[in-house]
Image: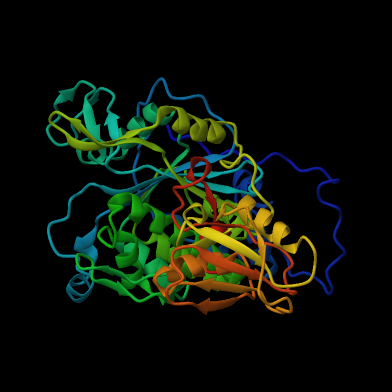
Amino acid sequence: MPTPSRSPRPRTAAQHPPRPPRRGPRPPVPPRRKPRWALRTATTLSVVVLASAGIGHAVLSGLDEDIARVDPFRDMKNRPEAGHGMNILLVGTDGREKVGRAEREEYRLGGTPCHCTDTIMIVHISEDRDRASVVSLPRDSYAETPPHTDRVSGEQHRGHPVKLNAAYAEGGPQLTVRTVEKMTRVKIDHYLEVDFTSFMKTVDVVGGVEICTDQRLKDGHTGLDLPAGRHTLRGGQALSYVRARHVDGASDLGRMRRQQQFMAALVHRATSSGILLNPMKFRDVTRAVLGSVRADEGFGTGELLDLGRAMRDFSPSSSEFTTVPIAKMGHLVKGVGSTLKWDTAKAEHIFDAIRRDQPLAAHPTREAARRVPVDPQQIRVQVENGTRTAGLGRRVDAALAATGFATTRTPANAAEQNVERTVVAYDPRWDRSAKSLAAALPGSELRAVKGQGPTLKVIAGADFVKVHKVRAQDPGQGELGVVRGDEVSCS
């Protein structure tokens, strides 16, 4: 039987002080159809918004019927103990046969559908509905299936090694859920399967999603070709972006980072554009999603409305993303090939946080670290005091070092002592390092100096206030590689 979603803990009056009454009379709330339905949805913001518009269920009627159903929890025994919050196994499948011929050609969707999982993520919604944690599980992860029956041949199989995405081809959603639960000891509450078609429709119906890149992204396999800068991607181009594996040497891990960045941008788009507060737009988005997905019987309109309520106060900083830490790349397994071996200790830290309904990042900082193309630890910096303020050079040097830059720790006085605007002097051959350093010193002037060499120079001016935190563009760095949505979004 599917596991029902858990209701959030009731909040006290102290947590929610009474709000002033709205002006004008409220339209009548539509009559309740079933007590259980009303109990499940009446407290959600989405229902309040829709009901106050006088259309409530009229807008959402029939959405449940749009969902193709699957039973991934049938006859499952010895499952992990339930924790708090809601755990959704989000699986991205091929489905290219549903895409029209012209779009298949434009977005390089040729070939035979693989009937396997291209993307696997655990999406955890906290019990108080204030946080979403997304953990990407690499499709080439080394996994061991539990005993099962082959869904094609009917043959009984013992547990055996596979790549994680092969569990779907061998045993469908049920074996995928069982394998993930065995690897993570996280109980899955709901299963949601999204294919290329539903992904493209969703991006189009929200009006496109903005992403940023500091370098050109070109992948001949998917047709992706984006120059550096900001881009608003529509359905097909967005699909190329999240599928691209050949834009750098990071292959699948690089692709998962881009998928996380895209999800953060999609959250920002949904929460900043009023979609969740516009009944008709909300309906269009849900229909775009539900029209070509498969889900368990327990995942329907009620859960979507619950998620809509969850996102009422969401911002990019409310979401956090990570990929299971990898201990060994290219782990060879006989009969399986090259796999990714998880770092069991670090992975357990992540899954334990999900089971306990805790943030993945133990100590999130208030100030979001700005993403930069070069790791500060790789940037050597000489600081000079360009003012007559005693000790300014030492302050700037210490602040840059605390942010991670490799300062010389020997600040000096500049030749000029009346510098108004802080200067970042750099050799043009190290321009990416210079941009990374300048991001930590907003408002500073970039000054190219041919022949200066690899050491960058900061001439502190009278405008200096503080050093802003920066982090390398690669979210795989830092504690467990956890990043918040606001750290990977354009803003």
The coloring applied to the image is: rainbow
Task: Say whether residue 491 is visible.
Answer: no
Determine the image quadrant of residue 191. Answer: top left
Q: Number of callouts in the render?
A: 0
> Does 150 sit left or right of 121 as displayed?
left
Asked if residue 176 is positioned above or below residue 38 in the image, the reply reads above
Q: Dividing the image into 4 quarters, which one contains the N terminus?
A: top left
Identify the residue at the far front of this view.
415
Asked if residue 29 is positioned above or below residue 474 in the image, the reply reads below
Residue 155 image offset from top left, x and y in percent: 14, 26
Asked if residue 8 is positioned above or below residue 222 in the image, the reply reads above
Q: Nearer the viewer, residue 191 or 319?
A: 319
> Does 196 sit left or right of 270 as displayed?
left
Q: Nearer the viewer, residue 465 or 337?
A: 465
Residue at screen point 39% across, 59% down = 258
Residue 183 image offset from top left, x and y in percent: 38, 29
Q: Dividing the image into 4 quarters, which one contains the C terminus?
A: bottom right
Residue 412 image offset from top left, x and y in percent: 66, 62
> Does 143 sit left or right of 268 as displayed?
left
Residue at screen point 49% across, 64% down = 266
Q: Nearer the viewer, residue 158 or 331?
A: 331
Q: Nearer the viewer, residue 304 or 418?
A: 418
Task: Say whether residue 410 is visible.
Answer: yes
Determine the image quadrant of residue 197. Answer: bottom left
